[in-house]
Amino acid sequence: MVKRKAIPPASLELLLFPASDTEYVHFEDALDHPFEADARLFSLVNAWWLADAALLAYWDATRAAPIWKRAGLEFEFLPSGGTQCHLAWSDRFVIVAFRGTQPNELRDLLTIFRVEHADWEFGGGKVHSGFRDAHHDIWPLVQQCLDRLGRGGRTIWFTGHSLGAALATLSMDRFEGPANLYTIGSPPVGDRRFAKGFDQRHAGRSFRYVNHRDIIVWLPGVLKFLVGSYRHVQERKYINAQGKCSGNPSLGEWPALLRVLLTGGRVARRLKAAPGDIRAGLPLPGAVVDHTPRRYAAGIWNAYIDT
C-alpha cells in the first residue's frame, strides 16, 4: 500500500540546513512511480520527482550520488563559487536541480536579500541582480553539460527551491531549446515585463509551487512597496493548510496570507541581521516554516497519491 508522507514539524534545522535531514527518503519507491519523460501537460508524478530533486540538491556529491543511482539515474555535481547544481539523467530525460539558499554562507544570504534590478539580456525586462549574478556564475557549466546530454532526444527539466528556484527560472529562460520548469518556494525573479515575456515564451511548461503562507513566495507584496515591480511567473500550484493542491488560495485563507504581507518585511530584516545566530533563538512564524523544502516534497507526494 502506498503511504502518505508525514509533514515535518517546525524546525530551523530542516528549514535552513536541509542536508542535515537523515529521515527523509528521497525518491522512495520511484521505480513504481516512473518519471513521465514525454509529458506535454502538467504531471503530478513529475512534480514529486522534481520536488525531491530540489531537496536533494542541498546535499553534497558524495551523499547524493547513491540516492540518484537508486532512482535509476546517472549523476554529475556542478559547483561554482557559492552556487551548486545537480544534473541527473537517464536515456530519456535530464533533471537540472539547483541548490537553494544556504543561510550559513554569506554569499547566499546577500543574494536572496538584494532587491536591485538588472537587465535580463536573454528575454527582456529586468531581474533580481543577485539571482542574475548567481545564474551567470554557474550557467557555463550547466550549458556545457546540456549540450552533451541533450543529444538523443532527452527532455530537459529544471527545478530548485528558494534561490535554486530562481536560478532554475532564469536557466529555463536562457536555455535554447524546449524544456520544462517545476519550482518550489520560488521568490519573485523579475519585473512585470520579464514575467509577462516569460509566461508567453513558456506557457504550459512552467509550474511554480507555493506552500500556503511561505514568506519567500509571498514577498512580492512587500517588495512592491520597497522597489515597485517584482512579479511572479506562472503557473501557480497552491498547497493549502490542509495539504490539498489547487491553483489559488481559497477566500478563507487570505487573512493568513495578508498577515504575511504585513509582517514579511520585519521577518526578513531579522533573518538578514542575525545569520550567525540563526540556528538558535529566532522564533518560527508559520510563514517561515512553510518555506521548508521537505514540507513541499511531502505535500506534493501526498497530493500525487491522493489523486
Image (cartoon, grey):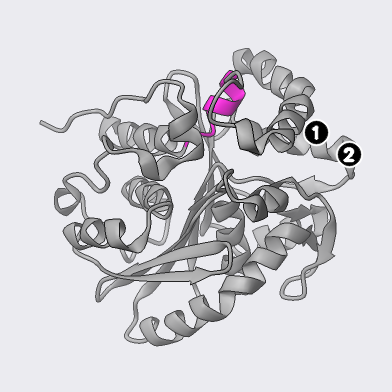
Disc 2 residue type?
Leu
Q: Secondary structure at mark 1?
A: helix
Task: Look at the image and tell me in which quarter the N terminus lies.
Answer: top left
Q: Does the magenta-highlighted stretch encompass residue 287?
A: yes
**Mark 2 in CB contact with mark 1 (< 8 angstroms):** yes
The residue nearer to you, when weighing 190 against 163, is 163
Q: Is residue 171 placed above or below 225 in the rendered structure? A: below
Q: Is residue 88 placed above or below 24 in the rendered structure? A: below
In terms of image quadrants, where is residue 75? Answer: bottom left
Disc 1 residue type?
Val
Q: Is residue 100 placed above or below 274 in the rendered structure? A: below
Q: Residue 272 appears at what percent x and percent y? A: 72, 37
Q: CA distance from mark 2 to mark 1?
A: 7 Å
Q: Does the magenta-highlighted stretch encompass residue 124?
A: no
Q: Secondary structure at mark 2?
A: helix
Q: Residue 269 appears at what percent x and percent y? A: 77, 32
In terms of image quadrants, where is residue 307? Answer: top left
The residue nearer to you, when weighing 280 against 200, is 280
On screen, residue 49 versus residue 102, left or right, reads left
Q: Is residue 140 placed above or below 41 in the rendered structure? A: below
Residue 176 seen: no
State the residue position of label 1. 222
The residue nearer to you, when weighing 166 against 78, is 78
Q: Residues within 10 Å of mark 2 (few under 14, many from 20)?
A: few
Residue at position x 63%, y 52% from top? 108
On screen, residue 68 versus residue 121, left or right, reads left
Q: What segment is highlighted magenta in the picture?
A: 285-292
State the residue position of label 2. 226
